[in-house]
Image (cartoon, coloured by chain):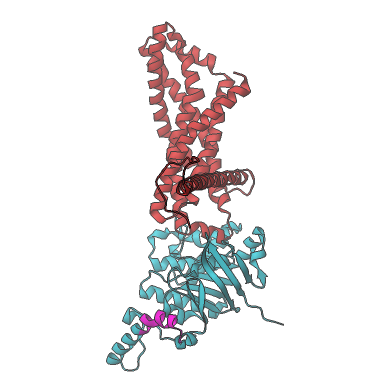
Chain colours: A red, B cyan
Amino acid sequence: MTGPRLRGPVFVSADRGPADYTVAVDALAAVGSRVRRVLEVVQDVTLFCVSVLRSAFFPPYYKHEILEQIHFSMIGSMFIVMFSALVAGQALAIQLARELAKQGAKSELGHFMVISSVRALGPVLTGIVVASRMSAGITAELGTMKSSNQIDALIAFGTDPMKRLVAPRMIGLWIALPVLTILGDTLSVIGGGFVGLGYHVTFQSYYNGVAKYLTPANLLVGMIKPIFFAILITTVACWKGLTSEGGAKGVGVATTESVVISSVGILVTDFICTKLIFRVLGW
Amino acid sequence: MIDLPMIEFRSVYFSIEEKDILTNVSFPVPRGQTRVILGPSGSGKSTILRLLMGLWMPDSGNIFVNGEDITQATPERLREIRKGMGIVFQQGALFDSMTVGENVGYTLLEDGHPDEEIEQAVATYLAQVGLDPELRDRMPDELSGGMQRRVAIARALAARNPEIILYDEPTTGLDPQSAERITDLIIRLRDTMGKTSIMVTHDIADAFKVGNRITVLDRGNVVFEGTPGELNAANDPFIAEFLAPFRKAVAAATQRMEVRVPGQVPGRGDSGASRAQPGGAP
C-alpha cells in the first residue's frame, strides 16, 4: 500500500521515509510524462513538416488554389507590410542618424540602413506581420473545416488534404514572402532616406551608401530567411488548424497559439538562419 | 455462387486512448439494402461510418466492402475503395468556400471531367434530390438546413455514382417536413437505384421507416440486431427503455388522431414526434 501524498521536498536524503520517496517518484513521473508529451509533439510536428514539404514538391498541384493563396497572402498582406516597413524603417533611421551624427559619420546612414533593413529588420518584420495575419487565417479556416467535418469529406471523396489545403498555402507563402520582403526592404530604405534629409544627409550621399552595400551577399542573407519563415508559418498554422479540437472554443485557442508560436518561431528561426549564414559565408 | 454482403463488420473492436468505443461489433449489409445503426448519443454509431470509410482503423476485427477486407488495404487501395462510396455527413459538411454547383460537381472536377459535363451532371443530381438546378450558384450558407442535406446527398450521388451511400444522422436538426423529404429520398435511392446504405441515427421513427434491418448500439456493444418488426417486439430492458419515449409519443398521437379521424395513422407533422408506427418499416 502506498502512503498518503505529502507535501515535501522533491530531493530524497538517506534519513527520509517512504512517503518522501513517493513524492520524489511522483514528481519524476510527472516530469517524465511532460517531457514525453513535448517529445511526442515535436515528433508529430516534424513528421507533419516533412509531409508538407513532400506535398509541396511533388505533383499533383492544385493550380487554382495556389494562385488563390498567392493572391491572399501577397496582395492581402501588401499594404500592411508596406506601411509597417515604412514606419519601422523611419524609426530605425532616426536612431541611426542621431548616433551617426554624434560620431560625425552621417554619410554612413545609407550603409547602416541597408545592412539593418535588408539583412535583419525587413525579413523579420515582414515575417511577423505576415505570420500574424496568415497563421490566424489558416488555422481558423482549417480548424473550422475540421470541426464541420469538411476535412473528412475531402478524404472521403478521395482528396488528400495535404495536397489540396496545405501544399498550396506553403507554395503561396514561398512566392509571396520573398516578394513582400523585397517590398518591405525597399520601403524601409526609402523611409530612411527621407529621415536622413532631416539630418542633412543628402539623397545622393544616402543613395551612394545604399548602392555600395546592396551586395548579392547581403541580399542573399535577407532572401533566404523568408523561405524558412514560410515553412514555419505554414507548418505551425496548418498543424494547429488540423489538430484543433473542441469546436469554436478549440479553434479560437488553436488560432491564438498558432499566431504566438509562429511569431516567436520567426525570431528563433531568424537567429538560427543568421548564425548559419554567417558561418557559411565566413563573416 | 455465394452472394457476399456488400458491407460486413466482423468482430470489430475499436478504442481511443484506452477507452472502448466499439466492442465485438458484427453485422452484414446485403446488396441493395439499408442497415440502420440506432443508439443514444455517444454509443459509437458515427465511429462505424468512420471505420468503414477507412478514416480510422479498428484495433481488431475485419471490415469487408464488396468482399475486400479494408483493414488490410494499402492507403492507395483504400482511396480507390472510398471512390465506390458516397457519404452524407452530419450537418451536410458542404465545402463552405464553394458554391452549391461546385460542391455537387466536386468529384467530377477532381477527376478532370469537362465543364459542360459537370454542369449537366450538377443539374441532373440537383433535380434528382428535388432541388432547383438554378440553386447551383448559391453558397451553402444561403440554403436552409434541409436543402443543405439534399445538396450533400446530391454530392454523394455525384461522387462517381457510388454503390454504397453512408448517412450520418441525415435528419438531425431538421424540421419534420424536411426530415420527411430526406428519408423519402433515402428510400427512393435504395428502391429505384439499388444503393446499399448504412444510416446512423438516434431518431427511432427514421430507423423504423428507412431500415431493412436495424442494429442497436449501447456504449459500443450491439444490444439488438434484426428487422424493425423484431425490434418493436424485443423484450430486452434496454430496448424497452430506449423505445419508451417513442412508443409513448406514437400512442398519444394515435389517440389524438382517433379522436379526430378514426383509424388514420398519424404523421410526424401531426404529432411533432413521429411519422411511422413501430414495425411499419419496409
Residue found farthest to the bottom? B262
Query: Foreground: B16 or B81?
Result: B16
Residue found farthest to the right? B1
Q: Is residue B98 visible?
A: no
Q: Where is residue B40 in the image (x, y as percent from the top left)?
A: 43, 73
The residues colored magenta run B235-247
Query: Foreground: B12 or B203?
Result: B12
Count the marks: how many? 0
The reply to whether the magenta stretch includes residue A131 is no
Is residue A232 positioned above or below B41 on the image? above
Q: Position of residue A105 (x, y in %)?
A: 44, 7
Is residue A67 positioned above or below A220 on the image? below
Q: Quadrant of the C terminus of chain A?
A: top right
Q: Position of residue A202 (x, y in %)?
A: 42, 10
Q: Quadrant of residue B205?
A: bottom left
Q: Main secondary structure of the magenta part?
A: helix
Q: Quadrant of residue A212?
A: top right
Q: Residue at x 38, y 9 (%)?
A: A200
Q: Can residue B6 be seen in this view?
A: yes
Residue found farthest to the top? A104
Q: Where is residue A75 in the image (x, y as percent from the top left)?
A: 45, 38
Q: In which quarter of the image is residue B11?
A: bottom right
Query: Foreground: A38 or A155?
Result: A38
Q: Residue at x 55, y 29 (%)?
A: A272
Residue found farthest to the left? B259
Q: Residue at x 36, y 83 (%)?
A: B267
Query: Foreground: A58 or B213?
Result: B213
Is residue A66 positioned above or below B204 on the image? above
